[in-house]
Image (cartoon, helix red, strand yellow):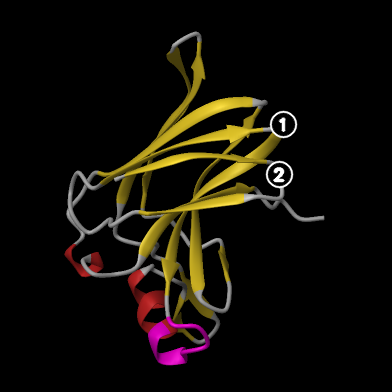
Amino acid sequence: MTAGCTAWSSNSSLTVPFPIGKIGATVTTKFQVHERQTYAFTVRYEYKKNDQVDRARVWKLAGGSIRESPGKWVEPGAPLKIRVNVSQQVDGGERRVTEKIVERPRLSSWGAANLDAELIAVTLARGNYVVTAVSLDEAPSFVGARTSLFIGRAYRGK
């Protein structure tokens, strides 16, 4: 799946559907950065807003923390293996900025209708970029799940 070019600054974000259930599932999108900033590339798991049953289902699917015993929590992460490649478009070609394989991404934030697992964070200068994310393993439990690649400013606290 390929998404079009979107221009944005540190306050903008981009979300592209990324069906990660099958090996080889790929998403590629081009975007333009107007402001030097650190951007996070994240797997976003969506659920029905304010639906605690659906949230619990997606939490388990995404490998959210669970209580193993009193006072002991474990965070297994999602049973996924994803390669992320970010390149800058220069002089009619591409220059790789970073490439990383992430195994068992762990949840990093959540909201009223989604859970997020940050894959990588990269500081990007002004320019045109392309990101490609590829699912490297079969993950049959994710078939039909609403998942996407989310790109936005990396939050690193105050």
Image position of 111 (left or right of 3): right
Residue density around tag 1, few if under 14, some if 14–19, many if 20 or more, within 10 Å = few
| Relative to 32, residue 58 above or below | below
Q: Name the residue under label 1.
A: 36
Q: Nearer the viewer, residue 53 or 70?
A: 53
> Is residue 59 depicted above or below 98 in this figure?
below
**Residue 59: percent from left, percent from top:** 42, 76
Q: Quadrant of residue 136?
A: top left
Q: Where is residue 13 in the image (x, y as percent from the top left)?
A: 59, 51
For the residue pair 136 and 69, the one nearer the viewer reads as: 136
Left or right of 23 in this view: 39? right
Amino acid beneath label 2:
Ser
- The answer to whether residue 16 is above or below residue 96 is below
Element under label 2? loop
Find the magenta span and give its range.
48-54
Say left or right for 35 vs 120: right
Q: Where is residue 146 in the image (x, y as percent from the top left)?
A: 34, 68
Viewer-closest of 89 and 140: 89
Q: Which mark is residue 10?
A: 2
Q: Which amino acid does label 1 sit on?
A: Arg
